[in-house]
Image: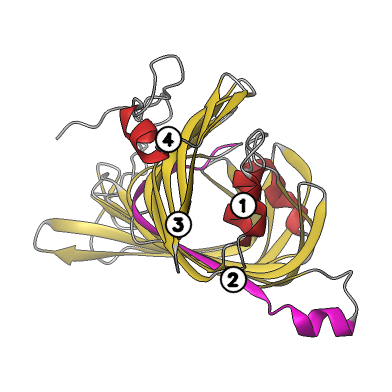
Amino acid sequence: WKLKRGVARAGSRMSLDSERFEVSLMGLRFVGSASVRSRTVRGKGGDATISNIEVPDYRLEDPDNRAADVVGQGLSIEATWPGFSLVHAQRPSSLTVALPETELRDLRVLNGLFPSQVPLSLTSGTGVVAARLDIRDGGAATGDLRFDADDATLTTRGTIHQADLEVRATLADGNLEERRFDVSGTTVRVSELRDPQLNEEQKKKLEPWYCELGVERGDIAFRKPVALDGEFAVSMYDVRPVIGLLRGIGKPPKWLFAVPNIKDINGIFALELDAGRTAVDDIAISGKGLEVLGWMHLQNKRGNGRVFVKYKGLAAGLGLADGKSSIHLANPRSWFERQPAAPPAARIGRQSSAFPARTC
């Protein structure tokens, strides 16, 4: 080192190899051997020290889940300090963390992210995740995250499925302390969804189902479980999941059970998801002859909502008040339009504790 009052000067260099290196990020700990190479260069703003840390093989440890089995190769960290001091601790002015493709040997480690009211669990399968995170001048973090899993086995409401999963996340305006990011522009795709218990003849009659979600605007807090607040666009192969949900609201009209399997479904909705509560607002779903409008809230295991559903010349209004359902067949659209957007007793605020108000 070339030092002046404990501060590295241009021309300084440092090399270090460690058999055990640990770095913590957003509650996760990366452990492995590492090589650290630092150099100090002269720039327009003065001397700056750049450190490159390479971790060829590492293990990802989750303090909340000791059973997590995640290993990877090639973790890379680059940090820059203006006026790097060996005497006083200081944060780098810029930090880049690059996580190359890392294998998730057991997808069940992700189940802790799902709120308890979400009827979904991953039961088997492997996946691959990769990410990059950039922090500049102590400001908000930005980056991206990719996740892929083929032939994942998942269970929804007691039914077993297999599917391919894909996430392409854009991370912006990140607050690492709160583990919160703006994920607008993110896409989530479920494809090749199928029932593994069907025989080959049955599989030929049912084409694999798919669904794609696009985040028009959204924030996510990466905690356990995750918290999510955003506006989404959805497209799906057919109407089966929508009709299935509507049939579960009390005693729906008999014609709802005779609706054919409509293909090419599209829609939009707003979603707030947090521990123990779900709010789906501004629902607008359409398909060939189909229209679904409404909102649904679930909090403390009690449901509230208003839905208008129409298929060609048939229509109905479906109500849910503290778990008690009602059906409205006389002028259902007029009934729906007279309903409040979200009664105060059922409202889940769009500004929850998970997403504190931002100031500009």
Residue at which label 2 appears: 210
Q: Which residues are magenta?
A: 200-224
Q: Which mark is residue 209?
A: none
- Residue at the (44%, 14%) spot, across then down: 345
Label 2 or label 3, whichever lies nearer to me, is 3
- For the residue labelled by badge 3, is the local secondary structure a helix, a strand or a loop? loop
Residue 194: image quadrant is: bottom right
17 with respect to 160 (left or right)? left
Q: In this rendering, is residue 270 above or below 167?
A: above
- Whether residue 111 is in magenta: the answer is no
- Residue at the (25%, 41%) spot, across then down: 5
Q: In this rendering, is residue 65 above or below 276?
A: below
Residue at which label 1 appears: 255
120 with respect to 269 (left or right)? right
Residue 351 image offset from top left, x and y in percent: 34, 28
- For the residue labelled by badge 4, is the local secondary structure a helix, a strand or a loop? loop
Residue 13 image offset from top left, x and y in percent: 37, 65
- For the residue labelled by badge 1, is the local secondary structure a helix, a strand or a loop? helix
Image quarter where the N terminus lies is bottom left
Number of marks in the image? 4
| Contact (Cβ within 8 Å) of mark 2 with mark 1 | no
Q: Which mark is residue 177?
A: 4
